[in-house]
Amino acid sequence: MPPEIPASLLALLSILGTLAVGAMSPGPSFVVVVRASAGSSRRDGLAAALGMGCGGLIFAGLALAGLQALLMQVAWLYLMLKAAGGAYLVYLGWRIWRGAKTPLSAAAGTTTGGAAVAVPGWRRSFAIAFATQISNPKTAIWYASVFAAFLPNPIPGWMFWALLPLIFTLEAGWYTIVACAFSAARPRAIYLGAKLWIDRCAGAVVGLLGGRLILEAIRAKA
């Protein structure tokens, strides 16, 4: 018979597996990384992936610190965070939609002798990705719910210290795969050929998700 998996290790694997499914689900984060990778460069896509990893790290840390209990007890704080996050996503969607007609050469840099000169934008890609990742307080509840469902009580010391770097690796690793895939020649060519409609669809999706958050906050308050 194979050796029995320790309960604490099984709990850790369950947490990582569940969070991986959540990270791979399409949403604003996926849209932002794809757009940075296909629309700018692989470096921008990797910077966005790093931003997503840092956002996941913060949510995991807050969940371990008991943010869920605070948000559940202070209802107005949760609604305020939800509305603020929704407003940011609506703004981001509008920016993407508005920039859809901007040629990639004008958005990413100038041209010299027919060759594009990229303007360093990885910091901006990181910042947008990080802000997108932490703009939805429901993600904090998701992390806290997964932890509550699978974490043993008491939490072994090794698991407490292993969770944060593993979750960062999970989030950043998945979006690194996305960035590398969509910054390849063929996906980039497809994006360049249909930039107007791809950006408008991406902007609409992000904006609608933000509007949904705001609507949920308004309904809960009513």
Image (cartoon, rainbow, N blue to C red):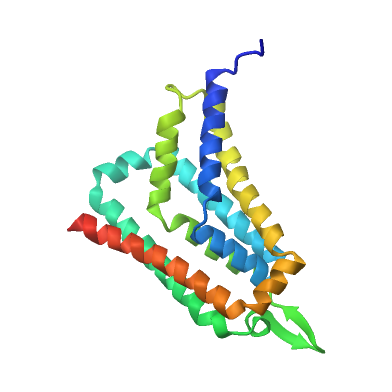
User: Residue at horizontal 57%, vertical 80%?
Assistant: 196
> In this view, which residue lies farthest toward the bottom?
113
Q: Is residue 138 above or below residue 126?
A: above
Q: Quadrant of residue 165?
A: top right
> In this view, which residue lies farthest toward the left?
222
Residue 120 in view of the camera:
no
Pinpoint residue 96: horizontal percent, then vertical percent.
51, 75
Q: Is residue 124 above or below residue 71?
A: below
Residue 150 in view of the camera:
yes
Locate residue 26 relative to residue 68 in the image: left or right: right
Locate residue 216 relative to residue 172 in the image: left or right: left
Pinpoint residue 112: horizontal percent, then vertical percent.
79, 88
Q: Quadrant of the N terminus?
A: top right
Pinpoint residue 142: horizontal percent, then vertical percent.
42, 44
Comparing 208 with 52, the one in front is: 208
Q: Is residue 117 above or below residue 31?
A: below
